[in-house]
């Protein structure tokens, strides 16, 4: 028997941007615990905007479990928030409400800024570094500084140790901005891994005095001016079995018609403040337009060359979701639109 540190992670009730919360419970198990072995738990919902003070209990239902290599016998327990009955999903529980399908694959590209003392990491006090250009995939102290690399390297290792399907990282266009990619099969699985990867990164930043800025446009300014900085997205690459194995031009056109028709429903769950980011500049389409195009980084949906080359088969990239979007809602909405299109 060993005592395991179970870190229950959940999303709070703050809007428009849910925060991540967690607390530890220690339990004895013969070996690394399976999901079915983990008990429900509770927390004070009045402190997380999830309940009134007089009836403040909310329940935590474990839904995914990951080893935590940063702690001896550590376990990360992704949880859904439930009402006191333990059965009814809390209104803030986005995971419970989305459609899922094992054949729906999602690859999320999470962009974010490291923040130190209220400014992006590497910005001189009260001012701005040199304009964008050398930072994207950059190397060297003047491009990426001396701390970020250490943090992203540790993030990779902790995610891989956890069994999270992290596929890569890169320095991004703005100074202090980075990206990691997560791939998962199933709406919930991909999004669970994304939330836990976000959690690991936010927790990792603590020891460095770094915050992770998930907001999609932390630094604003006019185009081509010294204050011109990229925003942060969470591009959602997606495919279903039908898209990968049958596909075809006619199906693709119907799919795009469905995305166009549901434009507002998609934008509604693609993250707060997206009008600041989806301007038609900085490799984005305007928030009020829906377009798609081959290798077009200025379109709402980018069609990879591989998709056309294999006869309209494969995955597509929705470039509109932003860095602060809830991946449960993004994956769920994409799947809902796909499911509205007949496959025969
Ligand atoms: P870029 O920066 O050029 O847009 P990235 O390499 O950062 O591209 O991200 C591409 C993403 O596409 C990865 O997250 C990858 O997992 C995902 N992906 C690849 N194949 C598929 C597929 N068949 N279905 C869904 N996502 C996929
Ligand atoms: Mn990318
Ligand atoms: Mn990117
Ligand atoms: Mn992309």
Image (cartoon, rainbow, N blue to C red):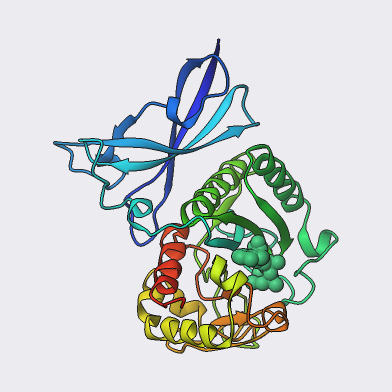
Find the residue positioned furthest to the left: 54
Find the residue positioned furthest to the top: 1
Residue 175 versus residue 4 in the image, above or below: below
Q: Please indicate, yes or no, whether residue 172 appears anywhere in the rendered image.
A: no
Q: Which quarter of the rendering shows the N terminus?
A: top right
- Say left or right for 139 vs 34: right
Q: Please indicate, yes or no, whether residue 90 appears anywhere in the rendered image.
A: yes
Viewer-closest of 63 and 6: 63
Residue 284 versus residue 7 in the image, above or below: below
- Say left or right for 253 vs 169: left
- Tell me which image quadrant ligand 4 sits in: bottom right
Provide residue 146's location: percent of width, then percent of height: 78, 52
Q: Quadrant of residue 220?
A: bottom right
At x 46%, y 89%, the residue is 289
Provide residue 320's location: percent of width, then percent of height: 51, 76
Residue 266 versus residue 324 in the image, above or below: below
At x 53%, y 45%, the residue is 196
Q: How many marks?
A: 0
Provide residue 212's location: percent of width, then percent of height: 56, 54
Find the residue positioned furthest to the front: 344
At x 58%, y 48%, the residue is 197
Q: Quadrant of residue 179?
A: bottom right
Provide residue 30's location: percent of width, then percent of height: 54, 14
Viewer-closest of 29 and 225: 29
Viewer-closest of 65 and 221: 65
At x 64%, y 73%, the residue is 314
């Amino acid at each position: 028997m060993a005592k395991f540190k179970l870190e229950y992670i959940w999303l709070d009730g703050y809007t428009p941007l849910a925060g991540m919360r967690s607390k530890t419970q220690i339990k004895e198990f013969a070996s690394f615990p399976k999901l079915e072995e983990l008990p429900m738990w509770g927390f004070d919902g009045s402190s997380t905007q999830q309940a009134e003070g007089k009836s403040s209990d909310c329940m935590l239902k474990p839904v995914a479990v990951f080893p935590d290599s940063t702690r001896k016998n550590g376990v990360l327990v992704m949880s859904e928030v439930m009402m006191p009955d333990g059965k009814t999903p809390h209104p803030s529980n986005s995971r419970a409400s989305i459609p899922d399908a094992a054949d729906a694959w999602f690859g999320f590209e999470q962009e974010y800024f490291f923040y130190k003392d209220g400014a992006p990491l590497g910005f001189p006090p009260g001012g701005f570094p040199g304009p964008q250009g050398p930072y994207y995939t950059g190397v060297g102290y003047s491009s990426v500084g001396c701390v970020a690399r250490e943090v992203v390297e540790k993030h990779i290792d902790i995610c891989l140790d956890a069994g999270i399907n992290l596929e890569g990282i890169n320095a991004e266009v703005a100074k202090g901005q980075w990206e990691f990619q997560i791939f998962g099969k199933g709406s919930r699985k991909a999004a669970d891994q994304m939330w836990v990867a976000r959690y690991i990164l936010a927790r990792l930043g603590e020891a460095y005095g770094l915050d992770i800025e998930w907001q999609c446009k932390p630094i604003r300014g006019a185009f081509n001016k010294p204050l011109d900085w990229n925003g942060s997205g969470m591009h959602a690459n997606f495919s279903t079995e039908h898209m990968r194995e049958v596909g075809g031009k006619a199906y693709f056109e119907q799919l795009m018609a469905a995305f166009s028709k549901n434009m507002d429903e998609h934008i509604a769950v693609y993250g707060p403040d997206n009008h600041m980011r989806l301007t038609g500049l900085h490799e984005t389409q305007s928030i009020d337009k829906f377009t798609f195009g081959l290798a077009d980084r200025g379109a709402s949906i980018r069609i990879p060359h591989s998709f056309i080359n294999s006869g309209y088969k494969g995955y597509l990239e929705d470039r509109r979701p932003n860095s602060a979007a809830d991946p449960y809602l993004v994956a769920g909405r994409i799947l809902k639109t796909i499911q509205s299109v007949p496959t025969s």
